[in-house]
Amino acid sequence: MTTVTADDLRERVRALLAEHDPGSTDRDDFLRARFDAGLAWVHFPVGLGGLGAPRGLQAVVNAELADAEAPDNNPPRIGIGLGMAAPTILKFGTDEQKHRFLRPLWTGEEVWCQLFSEPGAGSDLAALGTRAVRDGDDWVVTGQKVWTSGAHSARWAILIARTDPDLPKHRGITYFVCDMSAPGVEVRPLRQITGEAEFNEVFLTEVRIPDAHRLGEVGDGWRVAQTTLMNERVAIGGGAMPREGGLIGIVADTWRKRPELRTPDLHDRLLRLWVDAEVSRLAGERLRQQLAAGAPGPEGSAMKLAFARLNQAISGLEVELLGEEGLRYEEWTMHRPDIVDFGGRDAGYRYLRAKGNSIEGGTSEILRNIISERVLGLPSEPRNDKDIAWKDLPR
Amino acid sequence: MTSPDLLYSDVEDDLRSSVRSLLADRCPPTAVLARCEGDRPHDLPLWSTLARELGLAGLLVPEALGGHGASAREAAVVLEELGAAITPVPFLSSAVLATSALLACRGAEPELTSLASGGLTAALAVPLSAAADGAFPGGVRADEDGVLTGRVGSVPDGAVADLLVVPAVGPDGPGLYTVRTDAGGVDRSAPVPLDLTRPIADISFEQAPGRLLAGPGQAEPALERALLTGAGLLASEQLGIAQWCLETTVAYLKERTQFARPVGSFQSLKHRLADLWLELVSARAAARNAADALAAGSPDAPVAVALAQAYCAPAAVRAAEECVQLHGGIGMTWEHPAHLFLKRAKADEIALGTPGRHRARLGHLVGLPG
Ligand SMILES: Cc1cc2nc3c(=O)[nH]c(=O)nc-3n(C[C@H](O)[C@H](O)[C@H](O)COP(=O)(O)OP(=O)(O)OC[C@H]3O[C@@H](n4cnc5c(N)ncnc54)[C@H](O)[C@@H]3O)c2cc1C
């Protein structure tokens, strides 16, 4: 097998653009053609939007297409699909599932959400109680999920449910793809501290899921979910970006444009955060270089931890820097946005939304547990929940 | 700007393992501790092996002059290992600081050749605390014949240098001179250092004969280049220190039992170590970035160096402080080597510009003025 080079990719981009002029082609048509040309995610296999090329070469494709002003798939709108569902489907899905789901997922024609957390199972996700019971070729699913981001815009969900309550909690779980338009799925908004409702609670009442929509083996859902969670942390920890590409860039801009806001104390704190942000960016870059060929390991969790702390510190500094303006907020009206956009909003929103960064995708406390146990090999706290049947756990 | 290569190459990994195995054999912390109280705190036999057999003395010297023609990336890897073993050898002072200054001067080939062979050890005659953005030092004066008079304090490894590279103000302005320490007129004394593993010397020149290497217009950038290179590579030494401190602490907490369980199973400690590990991972990226920028002669090197110092210096200090604290009573003893790392880390924080100074420098470089 010959390896794909940057020049091959440029050639393929040229061919794509020649056949589908982005100026005159419908956006979805263009994105489908890009997927079929293997230029969606070049590290994916041929036939599934990729070319089996090194992951690092994606940047070449993106740059060429951006130069040609071609439409992109608006990644922030479909982050859960791209960052979590897709790698899990790729690793555990059947051929049929891969071909059914990946293309519209990538083009954004079908948005995905994540039905993992429950009122009684957050950090202790493996304690989840939503039940899936086999009935012929279907599973019948009943339970309640919560904090489901974007459930109101989603066509599909990745879902974990309990298929065997008699086994210890990690073992009786199975992973499914759930149709959000199926009868019995009810989505209700949950308003957040920002005023809007990005997340929801989702009630599942005897929802029928065909067995063909199971990902991985029955009872193997916890292992499948690990792939999702590792990828989620990497996705939240951020992709490649230029210097000052994150929230620090917004504060730095304000600092440069508005000398009247400057004080020595703020200056010192700004520079400290600039250093931390730039070093974290480089650490992320180093991690990407390490991962160029492999899969995300627990180090990805470390980046998510750093990202949460930084975002919170920087957005906090920004509100303070703005002084009197920091007393105002854009608006508290209840919305149901389908995108999280840190950059396009005001400082108060950034400050409040960043609070979720250390909760979503595994809290910072849980991430520290993971690092200390899986990376440093420190012993776990004494536990009393590992070897007893889920149904007998104290609640 | 192309993205920096932040990984280690195979050649760098090989270099690391040969340095590491030599140090494991010849320089365990117990030996460093025993030596640093004696009247010969430097391990010159070890330095001779490192310098000649592994060729570290001439690592940065071009092959044509008998060196290895390696880059800052390789020197950085060596410093990680030397830091992780707090090795009392004059690598940073001779093979990095003095060598970089000489490399930036024209006509220093004879000195560089002697350094590369390991026959001569040099020191840059500036205080360890000197920073690349500082004013040109004015403590030593030179006359028109290159005869030096004056004083410079806290010169790292100054006591074991055969050759000093001295910034001095001559009749026409700033100059860089070389002075043999065995020539008359050079007097060296050794103050009691905070960091026992990198001794410092106070040096006075009384009509000491020097050789002019670079005059006004060349001496300043040569000195700046040396101090910038030194600061950038010091970050890798700091990384090595932090790495030792974290590894040693983790190993101890797995083993030490209190309340009928390993203390390393207590979450408050686990979380502290997780944070420390995150800092270590970050420090590695910052140090590699600086080494890569220096190696590539990147225009971004001043930013990369200031960034690495602003981050790695406090990271090493924190790792060493946590190492002492989490060892409990034993961490407070003279017998346990933790204090050697603490002292090195703290001295390194002042070395070649404090973190605050590097932050201020960054403010200028990236357009965030106060
Ligand atoms: C903005 C946002 C979006 C989200 N989107 C989604 C989504 O789309 N899909 C989805 O499934 N979930 C989503 N979540 C849910 C998120 O994954 C959970 O909130 C998170 O895992 C924490 O669970 P919990 O809320 O039940 O808190 P709990 O687990 O009850 O935690 C409460 C506190 O205890 C701490 N804690 C718990 N266990 C330990 C321990 N062992 N050691 C130390 N401290 C501990 C936690 O860190 C936390 O501070 C979202 C959350 C937020 C904030």
Image (cartoon, rainbow, N blue to C red):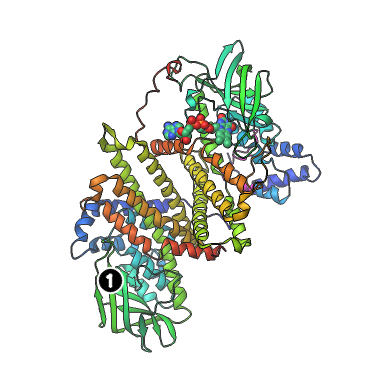
Give the dominant element type of the magenta stretch: helix, strand or loop: loop
Does residue B285 lie above or below B351 as drawn? above
The stretch drawn in magenta includes residue A48? yes
Quadrant of the image containing the N terminus of chain B? bottom right
Q: Nearer the viewer, residue A346 or A228?
A: A346
Quarter of the figure with residue B65: bottom left
At x 30%, y 60%, the residue is: B50
Q: Nearer the viewer, residue B103 or B198?
A: B198
Judge left or right: residue B39 versus residue A176. Answer: left
At x 39%, y 20%, the residue is: A387
Quadrant of the image containing the C terminus of chain B? bottom right
Label 1: state its secondary structure. strand
- Residue B67 percent location from the top left of the image: 38, 66
Q: Nearer the viewer, residue B5 or A247?
A: A247
Judge left or right: residue A53 versus residue B90. Answer: right
Query: What's the residue type where badge 1 is placed?
Result: Ala
The stretch drawn in magenta includes residue B352? no
Total of numbered circles in the picture?
Answer: 1
Instruction: Give the extent of the magenta segment.
Output: A40-60
Residue at label 1? B201
- Residue A233 percent location from the top left of the image: 52, 38
Q: Most extreme residue toward the right, as rendered?
A: A24
Does residue B258 lie above or below B182 as drawn? above
Q: Nearer the viewer, residue A171 or A193?
A: A193
Q: Most extreme residue toward the top, as rendered?
A: A136
Quarter of the figure with residue B81: bottom left
